[in-house]
Amino acid sequence: MNKINKLFSEQKVTGKKILSLYFCAGCPTLEGTAEVIKTLEKRGVGMIEVGIPFSDPLADGPVIQSAGTVALKNGMTLTKLFEQLRSIKDEVQIPLVLMGYLNVVLHFGVEKFCQQCVESGVSGMIIPDLPFADYLNDVKPIADKYDLRVIMMITPETSEERIRFIDDHTDGFIYMVSSASITGAQQNFDEQKQAYFRHIHSMNLRNSRMIGFGISNKQTLESAWQNAAGAIIGSKFVTLLNETQGDADKAMDLLQTALQN
């Protein structure tokens, strides 16, 4: 069974909420990717999103944009990332999801990308700028061949009809973006966002949902956990990883403190 499906199947049984963390491969150090992943698994993180640095990340806020710039300057490439992931494939049991932009995947080659994902222990991918029609026609058949999950995002502006269409044609989980804006930490989720969370919850979708964008403290984390299978934290963790110069253990200590306030 694909590790993503296994994770969410177990979550439905146990009810334990999932914490997923994002960081950008190659930032703050080129060779730190493998160690960050191993440390996060030891610290109880349920799933990890590994960012593929790109020069024009449209959906990302300044923190993740800056991380991508640093990673590219450090010399991180997709080929290098796959090499790093292969080195720890047999040590890591939790799902790894690659998050990157379509241009990078197309330049690498969709089939080659999927093949390398399998060889590197990756269970799925998030491609924010992948048009759904292109996903259905060009990417999904290849991803299915390699038993990889292509995770789609929804926002408060996504219509109910489209959400159900996405739910019917994807597998793994749905990435529920907290707001129709770029990534970045927020102090709270207002009533409008809470209403959006409740509405999606009431739709009884087939796929589990993870809420991301803006989660950085106790209020935003608990709000996400009340309305989904788990929460995704990106910008906050990237900031802390930079502050600790790539020491994921120290970054996790700081993150846990932030999530209690």
Image: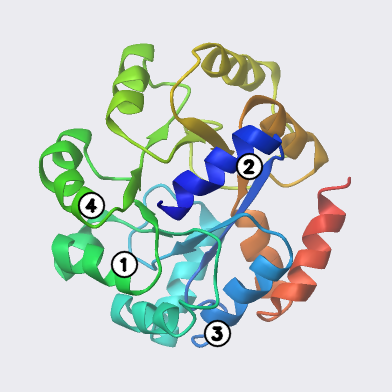
Number of marks: 4
- Residue type for callout 2: Ala
Relative image position of residue 194 (x, y in whole percent): 66, 20
Other-residue count near label 2 (Cα within 10 Å), few / some / many at <14 / 14–19 / ≥20 = many
Judged from the image, the secondary structure of the residue bearing numbered disc 3 is: loop
Could you tell me the amino acid type at mark 3? Thr
Name the one closer to the observer, 234 or 19: 19
Residue furthest left in the image: 137
Considering the numbered disc 4 on the image, is that residue within a helix, a strand or a loop?
A: helix
Q: Pick the residue in front: 35 or 41.
A: 41
Dot placed on the residue nearer the N-terminal end, 4 or 2: 4
User: Which tag, 3 or 2, sits closer to the chain's start?
Assistant: 3
Quickly name the residue at label 4: 143
The residue beneath circle 3 is 29
Mark 4 and mark 1 lie on one chain; the one further toward the N terminus is 1
Residue 118 tag number: 1
Residue 242 placed where, x, y %?
66, 73
Q: Residues within 10 Å of mark 3 (few under 14, many from 20)?
A: some
Image position of 135 (left or right of 170):
left
Give the spatial CA distance, label 3 vs label 4: 30 Å
Query: Which of pointers 3 and 4 lies earlier in the amino acid sequence?
Result: 3
Label 2 residue SS: strand
Rendering quarter of residue 80? bottom left
The residues bearing labels 3 and 2 have C-alpha atoms spaced at a distance of 26 Å
Residue positioned 88% across, 47% down in the render: 260
Q: Which residue is mark 2?
A: 231
User: Which amino acid type is marked by label 1?
Assistant: Val
Give the mark nearest the N terminus, 1 or 3: 3
Task: Residue type at mark 4: give it.
Answer: Ala
